[in-house]
Amino acid sequence: MDWKSDADFADRFHEALGNGGIRAWFQPVFRSLTQQIMGAEALARWFDPDGNMLSPADFIPQLEQGGLIFELDMEILRQACALYDELRARGTPLSRVSVNLSRLDFAREDLFEQVCSVLHAYSVPREAVSLEITESVMLEDTDAFEKVFNRFSDAGFSVWLDDFGSGYSSLNVLQNYPFDVIKFDMLFLRKMSAKGKNMLASLISMAKTLGIHTLTEGVETNEQREFLLDIGCEAQQGFYYARPLSREALIEQIDRKPGILEKKEDEAYWGQIGRLNFVNPNPLKEYAERWKSSPADYVSSYDGSIALIECGRENFTYIYATEGYKERLRELGFSSVDGLENALTSHQRGHYYLAIHKLVMDALQQGTIQTVEYAYRDVYYRLSALFIARREGRAMILMRLNTFDAEREVKTAQEMLDNGSALFFTYEMVAMIRPEMKKAKRIYAASSLPSYDREESVDKTIRKFCENHVDPADQERYLQFANMETMGERIRNSPRKFIQAVFRMRLEKNQSNWYSARFTEVPSSSEPVYILTIQSVQENLNRWLNLFAEEHPEMF
Ligand code: C2E
Ligand code: MG
Ligand code: MG
């Protein structure tokens, strides 16, 4: 569009304002964790009389030069409020709208009153409007800006720092003003270089430390989307999700998928969860200490194994899990987090379900980090949980899953076993055997079995146990199975690093039943240590025999 003079330009602008040529387009903002729409940013478009669409770069500098930008910004704010009002009235409310303010707007004494009067006209609450301002604003007239900033902030508006990292970024700005959100410029994502990614990850971590929410603009690919999710960036905006849309097109999108809108009442819930720092060396500890009063000292090394689990009254849903967490779930035998969800919500409600359920309930009630250590398939795990946020009928729990550290000494294992975890109830008996020390110590027994740890050798202990409790038909096989001379070799050669077999035993009331016995080696640097577990298979014989057949096809 050409114009002859500044006066001509101003005339055409006013003409466009009068005849609907200035229109707000709306680009939705998405929550990384849920892929729901948290709000929309209003962006100015100018349609000339021929119907050509002009972008802000084509006219904003001239509007600023001509002292007209305030009129544009108020018009876009009006249209944003009108959209908010319309969506609310038709029962598909949008949580918030954001508008851009020019640095020149801040030179106006009446900016605050003018903005408020527009909101008032459409009955839009202040909490629903975000004001995006770029850093250059703060470099100009600091005192005046500070006054206006504080008025908006104190009145309940959310003030966002736009285009962070694009130009004159100064970290001081973050120190001086209580911004609610930093919008990271799309420049960080452009190349997806290691440097750019690391910078963005660090800046997002820093923002969380300062208590500022994070949004990244210019998301164009799925790779970028996933990266932002993994570094804990809370919100995303960009062509990958949606281009800026006309009011009509946005409404059409919403009508096609009404569930895509985040509910306003859930905003605080997700906002609290968004404070979690995914890339912190110890996110649970950091969260607990920063946002709650500090719990007892919890020391553990970072392994990136965390997940967010949302608990309803009847079920658990994984909202997010890191690769490290998924890897450990695979070690536990769940092919995916979905597999675990199914196991957790299944009607069987086994020991595993009960153990996690108790952990989660404790975390909810105590508000501090809850930890359980337990055995599953004879591998030892530590699961920690921390309550993060709550909403109607649901609560978010941060979980951390650690496998037992290979370097952990026997002593630690012994301590853990001595303390006894609830999961021992899944066993009839648990014993620790240290052949070199000639020690076989019973750690847990469900019934009143005599203990055999006073014998002078491990072999004798095993033989005594065998004579007294293993069915005569299975005794020879049991002695071979429990042979300490070949134990280490057999375990190391087994694909799953334990050996297992089923035997008929008499552990209660002289009645013979099927039991599964398993030897697992405890990782230890000094001497071989084995854990023997004996578990009843009678209750669910078919399940165990299938497993047995899988492990010992030669027996069938
Ligand atoms: P902004 O506020 O940072 O807005 C984001 C800009 O990035 C928009 O450009 C948007 O269309 C574009 N964008 C969004 N996603 C992507 C993406 O995935 N890839 C790429 N390449 N671009 C993407 P737009 O609409 O041209 O606006 C440019 C700038 O003009 C805005 O940057 C804002 O600073 C300014 N502006 C827009 N509307 C207004 C307004 O009403 N008032 C004032 N004062 N400034 C405005
Ligand atoms: Mg903006
Ligand atoms: Mg921007």
Image: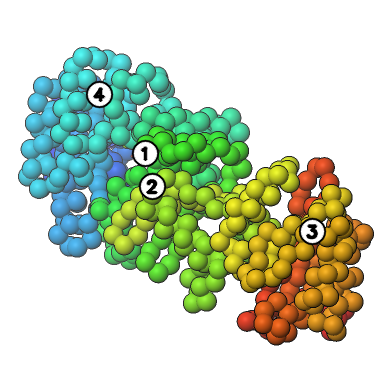
Q: Please give the count of numbered marks on the rendered protein.
A: 4
Q: Left or right: 183 with respect to 515?
A: left
Q: Residues within 10 Å of mark 4 (few under 14, many from 20)?
A: many
Of the residues under marks 1 and 4, which one precedes in the sequence? Answer: 4
In the rendered image of this protein, does residue 537 appear above or below residue 233? Answer: below
State the separation of the CA atoms marked 3 and 2: 45 Å
Q: CA distance from mark 3 to mark 1?
A: 50 Å
**Dot 3 or dot 2, earlier in sequence:** 2
What type is the residue that disc 3 sits on? Answer: Arg
Q: How many neighbours does mark 2 have within 10 angstroms: few (below 14), some (14-19), or many (20 or more)?
A: some
- Residue at image coords 50%, 61%: 356
CB contact under 8 Å: marks 1 and 2: yes
Question: Which mark is first along the chain, 4 or 2?
Answer: 4
The residue where tag 1 is placed is 292
Distance CA(mark 2)–CA(mark 4): 44 Å
Marks 1, 4: nearer the viewer: 1
- What is the C-alpha distance between the residues marked 1 and 4? 37 Å
Q: Quadrant of the C terminus?
A: bottom right
Q: Which mark is residue 103?
A: 4
Disc 4 marks a residue whose amino acid type is Arg
Sequence-wise, the earlier of marks 1 and 2 is: 1
On residue 367, the disc is 2
Q: Quadrant of residue 72?
A: top left
Q: Is residue 398 above or below residue 166?
A: below
Left or right of 265 on screen, residue 497:
right
The disc, 3 or 1, on the residue closer to the chain's N-terminal end is 1
Residue ID for mark 3: 454
The answer to the question of whether label 3 and label 1 lie on touching residues, with beta carbons closer than 8 A, is no
From what the image shows, is residue 368 above or below residue 63?
Answer: below
